[in-house]
Image (cartoon, grey):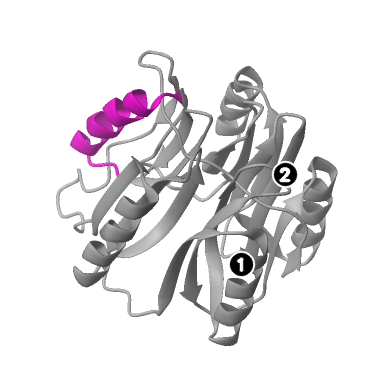
Amino acid sequence: MRATGKIVTVASVLAGAAVPMAVTAPPVGAQAGAHAAPAWVAYHGVSAADSVKRFHQLRDQGYRPITVNVSDGQRYAAVWVKDGSSAAWGMWQGMSASGFQKRFDAELKNGLQPVSVSATGPADLPVFAAVFEKKSGKFVSKFGLTSSGFAAANDKAADQGLALTSVDAYGTPGDIRYAAVWSANTGGAWYYTYGKSRQQHEAEFYAKKEKGFRPVKVAVAPDGTYAAVWRKDGVKSWAHYVDMSGSGYQKRFDALKAKGLAPVQVNAENGTYAAIWQ
């Protein structure tokens, strides 16, 4: 892993300010004979101490994390699933840039790769959180990337047959940095955007949706812009919302849970949340 920078965040939401970005088709499991979805647990806006407590509780109950986010003042959000997977995994939080690099090196020696990387704080003093899984295959992981560096890294990864599978934005409004992971492209065309205002992100959403793409990753930057990964993967039941406060995210969470949709990624910065369900 090349250490170049750091960070991303978790926050809150204004009721009524959420921009609906679509739910398509019946929710998973709605059709007769559909397979039961794995059990899952999600939380957001919790302290570092509470995050550690939940880690031990959920791990002992057989859950594993699939996504993690850290934001303002080391507030954490995560989604855990109980799906019967036997793959080894690790979850770490409160790491400095050098601490994250050391953890990365140690996990890599054990055959684990980063699957979700998040950071928050200025580029020269970030705090990281990450989920690692034991898996094979080529991948690239970088942090501290400027906008131009992020674009160049995406182009290079695509040329190598990799797809952007984790992205976070951190830093300050005048110095945005990106942390990202590119893994083997397991199916479907993909595309990425970054530095988009809410209105531009929404326009991108509708344009991409017309072409069969949907957002699979989203990150809120310190300046309020959005980065996203779009994929044409044929998934029919999903939802995407941005520009939410913490309470707004909770209301959306409750409504979509009643429809059978589970969050698969939660991201926030400066109190603004974005999330994806399926």
| Residue at figure coordinates x 66%, y 27% from the top left | 223
Q: Quadrant of residue 199?
A: top right
Report x, y in % for residue 70. Answer: 49, 47
Q: Specify few, some or many for label 2: CA neighbours under 10 Å numbering under 14, 14-19, or 20 or more.
A: many
- What secondary structure is found at the residue carrying circle 2? strand
Task: Decide: is 185 above or below 10.
Answer: below
Q: Quadrant of the C terminus?
A: top left
Q: Which of 31 and 88 lies nearest the eye of the viewer?
A: 88
Q: Which of 230 and 264 lies nearest the eye of the viewer?
A: 264
Residue 213 in sight in this render: no
Task: Decide: is 128 above or below 258.
Answer: below
Report x, y in % for residue 192. Answer: 68, 43
Instruction: State which mark lies toward you, 1 or 2.
Output: 1
Residue under label 2, please give it: 177
Q: Which of 136 and 171 lies nearest the eye of the viewer?
A: 171
Residue under label 1, please give it: 99
Q: Label 2 is placed on what type of residue?
A: Arg
| Residue at figure coordinates x 61%, y 65% from the top left | 100
Residue 252 magenta: yes
- What secondary structure is found at the residue carrying circle 1? helix
Q: Label 1 is placed on what type of residue?
A: Gly
Q: Specify few, some or many for label 1: CA neighbours under 10 Å numbering under 14, 14-19, or 20 or more.
A: some
N-terminal-most mark, 1 or 2 = 1
Residue 215 magenta: no
Q: Quadrant of the N terminus?
A: bottom right
State left or right for residue 223 relative to residue 106: right
Q: Which of 1 and 229 lies nearest the eye of the viewer?
A: 1
Residue 223 in sight in this render: yes
Magenta residues, as a range?
Answer: 244-262
Q: Main secondary structure of the magenta part?
A: helix
Task: Decide: is 274 above or below 233.
Answer: above
